[in-house]
Amino acid sequence: MLTKRHLLGATTALLALGAAALAQDTRPAATTAAPAPAGTRFITVASTTSTVDSGLFNHLLPLFKAKTGIDVRVISQGTGQALDTGRRGDADVVFVHARAAEEKFVADGHGGPRRPVMYNDFVLIGPKSDPAGIKGSRDIAAALTAIQTKAAPFVSRGDRSGTHQAELALWQAARIDLAATRGTWYREIGQGMGAALNTAGGMNAYVLSDRATWLSFRNRGDLDILVEGDRRLFNQYGIMLVNPQRHPHVKQADGQAFIDWIVSPEGQKAIADYKINGQQLFFANASDTGA
Amino acid sequence: MDISQSFAAAIGLILGGDPAFLAIVGLSLTVTLSAVAIAAFIGLPLGALLALARFPGRGAVIVLVNALMGLPPVVAGLLVFLLLSRSGPLGPLGLLFTPTAMVLAQTLLVLPIVIAITRQLTEDLHGEYREHLASIGLTGRSAIPTLLWDGRFALATAILAGFGRASAEVGAVLIVGGNIAGYTRTMTTAIALETSKGDLPLALGLGIVLILLTLAINAVTYGASRVGARFAG
């Protein structure tokens, strides 16, 4: 097993920690080579809960590994947190879904260029009893207005994730000033998509979800899709290499190889092929440069 | 309904021998036992030293160590995260999102428990045997090895308490490990993941396996200390 190496690594780090604490300077005394983590070639990708929880990576990564021999270590976070991980240099590639935030990430010099990869869509989930009476509507703004007017419980991710940012934009599209009108019906939980769905199920609340997570979610209880198909519910994913000029340890070649593969016809086909119960979850659109 | 499904899931996991699952169990044990070993290696002598040494501010140190037993795992995780992040002071080591980072975070959690309990036990033991120890020429710090050896069965409880804290926590390993499939996914982060995927029976099933593992380790330790006590007569 790896016991010895972990022990050694942890002891080294503890010693370094002590040294760093002793030194007035905050720079570590020793910057010697780290114990090489197990495995061979690998990159770290900061991505979102939707791509991980939906099982997309379980489908894609073996294909990429077979082709290139590169292991991909995926950390699933909300989009805001994933971009932060890239900003600090703790990942080689960022694969997220919040275009405005991604463009700011690139503009600030943290990485890029941003490549569009695929889209899926958001759906408004709610209890089958539907207290706001919105089932079957294709107008997300009208649906949100009805929820707010009836003060029906609504669960918000509240975690700066791509879904949370999309939700806030939709309230804006509905011309609802959340800061002024929110009451106990609006419940920010600050957690991932799955936790938000579990919470909504537990309190018979409405919640905005990406379709992929919803389709793979197992604890649906009394929840169902109530509103879908509005083009404002479109959810674009983009991928970026973290800036190797700013973070010299970033694995530029292998990270770029992953990005190139994801947007190649082969990677795009792999994305389109991923289905749950015969339903396609993500729609590859790397060739759409405007996405 | 759900709970009986969970027991079925737990039995399936144990009997199934799925390599991915076994790797998760293996990593959980490796990380936690490494952290406990390091914490014991550092904490036992330090705790005994704290019991015997007299210095200004000793009371404050004892209160601090006792209080750190309540260090929230998520805070320990954040601290290690900020230290190990590429933008942090130890960034060049490249240890974030590795099992080593997880060992480090859990060591921080276990260490105060080992120090605090060792300090209390050694102090009590020393109070009892001070004169006897002095009569065989062991005064002050030279008594530490003898005290630790004599108190070894009680100290096993300190180590088990540390093990319990480390094996049960999810906040620290999730932050510094990143729950990467096949690399830093442990029992507890897998439970958190399955919960977020809404597969509650599987999540609880994993939990049952974790509890059984903890039970087994405690049973072995108890058995060993009973046998040891008999031979120590």
Image (tube, coloured by chain):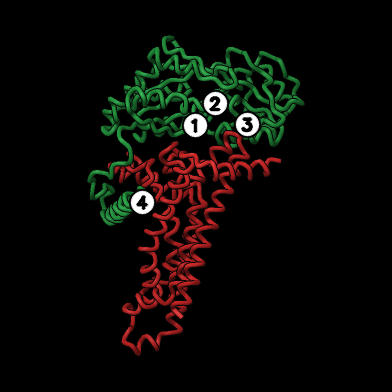
The answer as to whether the residues below labels 3 and 1 share one chain is: yes
Residue at image coords 54%, 26%:
A163
Element assignment for label 2: helix
Shade representing chain B: red
Q: Earlier in the sequence, mark 4 or mark 1?
A: 4
Mark 4 / mark 2, whichever is N-terminal: 4
Please identify, in this view, whether the residue under mark 3 or under mark 1 is nearer the observer: 3
Identify the mark nearer the N-term, 3 or 2: 2
Q: Distance between the Cα atoms at labels 4 and 2?
A: 39 Å
Disc 4 versus disc 3: distance between alpha carbons?
36 Å
Cβ atoms under marks 4 and 3 closer than 8 Å: no
| Residue under pointer 1 | A78
Residue A143 shown left or right of residue B9 in the figure: right
The earlier-in-sequence mark between 3 and 1 is: 1
State which chain is coloured green.
A
Question: How many numbered marks are there?
Answer: 4
Indicate the position of residue B198 as horizontal and vertical percent values: 61, 34
Residue assigned mark 2: A163
**Kind of element beneath mark 4:** helix
Which residue is more in the foreground, A148 or B52? Answer: B52
Gap between marks 3 and 2 measured at Cα:
19 Å
